[in-house]
Amino acid sequence: MGDDQTEEAADKAVDPDRLLEGENPDTTYLEDATHWVTVYSELLAVKRDLVGVSESRLPDLPTEARKEVATTDLVVLDAEMKRFSQRLAFWRQRCVDLGGSPAA
């Protein structure tokens, strides 16, 4: 991956306003909203798993590696989790607005 691609991916990962491909926040279809609840629930679960693995490995890492993981990887993962949590909350509310259940 080139430097431009790396920088673009990093920016996209933490952009709180970025939507996923095909995501339409103005949809009037409950099926669409429940789909996005599922998508963001799964993405959030994956990020939580990555944070858990990373944090569990921290004590075994050399100081320099521990600092790197804590100040870069975990910071980006935290930002991604916040973004996914916000999108999940949005889609849960959208489900309610469209007459459905907020849970998926």
Image (spheres, rainbow, N blue to C red):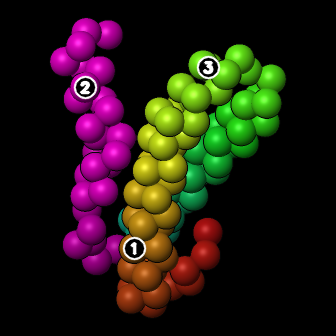
In terms of image quadrants, where is residue 36?
bottom left
Q: Earlier in the sequence, mark 2 or mark 3?
A: 2
Label at residue 65:
3
Q: Name the element at disc 1.
A: helix
Q: Earlier in the sequence, mark 3 or mark 1?
A: 3
**Nearest the eye: 26 or 58:** 58
Q: Name the element at disc 2.
A: helix
**Does 71 sit above or below residue 40?**
above
Q: Residue furthest left?
A: 4
In terms of image quadrants, where is residue 97?
bottom left
Residue 60 part of the magenta-drawn span: no
**Amino acid type assigned to the residue bearing label 2 in the image:** Glu
Q: Quadrant of the N terminus?
A: top left
Which residue corresponds to mark 2? 7
Tell me which residue sits at (39%, 79%) in the image: 94
Label at residue 1:
none
**Amino acid type assigned to the residue bearing label 3 in the image:** Ala
Tell me which residue sits at (47%, 33%) in the image: 72
Q: Quadrant of the C terminus?
A: bottom right
Residues drawn in magenta:
1-29
Which residue corresponds to mark 1? 90
Question: Can residue 92 be seen in the rendering of this structure?
Answer: yes
Q: Name the element at disc 3.
A: helix
In terms of image quadrants, where is residue 5?
top left
